[in-house]
Image (cartoon, rainbow, N blue to C red):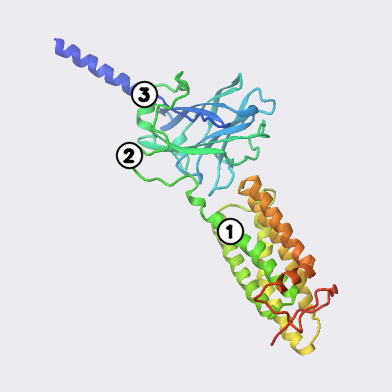
Amino acid sequence: MFKGVFHVFLIAFLFALRCCGEAAQYCNPTDREDTDVCIALSSFYNETASSNDLNVHMSARFKNNEGWAALGTGVIMHDSLMFVMYPTKDKKDVILSVRTTTEHYAPKKADKPPEYTVIQSSEESGLYDLQFVCHACDQWRGNGIDFTRRSRFIYAAYAGSGFSSSDEAFPMKKHSNYGVFYVNMASIRAEKSTIPEIADNGRVSTIPLSSDPEGEEEPSPAASSWLFPIHGFVLSLAFLVLMPLGAALLRAGVEGAFVLHWKIQLAAAALAIIGVALGIFKSWSHPLNIGSSFGVHKLLGGLLFLSVLAQPALGYVHHRIYLSVKGPTTPGRIHRWAGRGILIGGWINVNFGLYIAGSSLWIRILALVFTAVAVLAPIYPVIASRFVEALPFFQRSTAGYNPLDRSDDVDLQHHQ
């Protein structure tokens, strides 16, 4: 008798544990002037729809009531389903924007996300609260959630000025804080679809944070974007260093200037081709949107790429004609003016790329200063000539280019 009653109570207890799974909570308060974020999750199996719902409770405190916080599925940004919250324009409420992206581009509003319902949104004493349900969240075909086992999530936040809007498609600014956490989805399944509460425990996580509890190695959220820095480096080297150097040497009229010029410019062109190829490879699946900063950067880069390919041919044709006429040529003039345009366009696009990449202000200022120096050197060939002439390993050409001659028709120095 006693044993039978005990079994009944044991079964009831185990069933209660299964039905009322404990919500997972992730919090990321920091000592910096950053965004204080807490996220609580639970799941519910909808038998009618034969799908799993994700119940989400997000809480965040933003510096000066401006910024954003986001929860994303998977371990990388690519194809992640992202739930982004940020203060409305009047900063008295919070808005939910469901987004996704490819590679490491800024997330944009998803075209066909799972249905979702905002249960509650509020703001109190600078603490923004958002509760919502993602219906049939396991139907997301991208980087989704496995509701039967441990799943990975990414979080990110931006703490900065100028980010509050009532527009769900408001352009995002690069995160200032991000990471990965893991949740055993089977353990947080609830019998009823209810929004989990943020535990009153001083905003402390109740789940593992950025380390994998099973000891598996996972890629970081930025693992797929490592080629972008290489793309930027080789193009910066080509447009900010080699191309201005090749032009300055030719204008300075040093011994062997013509040979140095075409060798350096060919090396710069090769680097430019490699850099553009890396950019095309990393952004092939991302549509070209001329209205976006990425679109303008890629369009200008494509035009520069075609121009760089044409420059060696123009220079060669000019050289062959020059050997016959011993004077200025039309291909030579086109070559010179196209080169100037390529330099200016390259400088603009390098700085534009640094801005898109979210480089720090001092790096962008340094690039602008470097660009200014590179611009001034060809404009004042006398300065460039005297500088190069002072170098011990260069000798002044007796038949060189005269830097004082400002005529645009002055021809390039040639040596057969």
As drawn, the residue found furthest toward the top would be 1
Which disc is residue 214 wearing?
2
Camera-nearest residue between 40 and 284: 40
In the picture, the quarter occupied by the N terminus is top left
State how far apart marks 2 and 1 are (Cα): 37 Å
State how far apart marks 2 and 3 are (Cα): 21 Å
- Disc nearest the viewer among 1 and 3: 1
Q: Please report contact status of discs 1 and 3: CB closer than 8 Å, yes or no.
A: no
- Disc nearest the viewer among 2 and 1: 1
Residue 316 left/right relative to 379: left
Residue 309, picture quadrant: bottom right
Residue at x-position 64% and y-position 50%: 363
Mark 1 lies on residue:
233
Residue 106 left/right relative to 395: left
Q: Earlier in the sequence, mark 2 or mark 3?
A: 3
Mark 2 surroundings within 10 Å by alpha-carbon count, few (fewer than 14), some (14 through 19), many (20 or more): few
User: SS class of the residue under badge 3?
Assistant: loop
Which disc is residue 21 wearing?
3
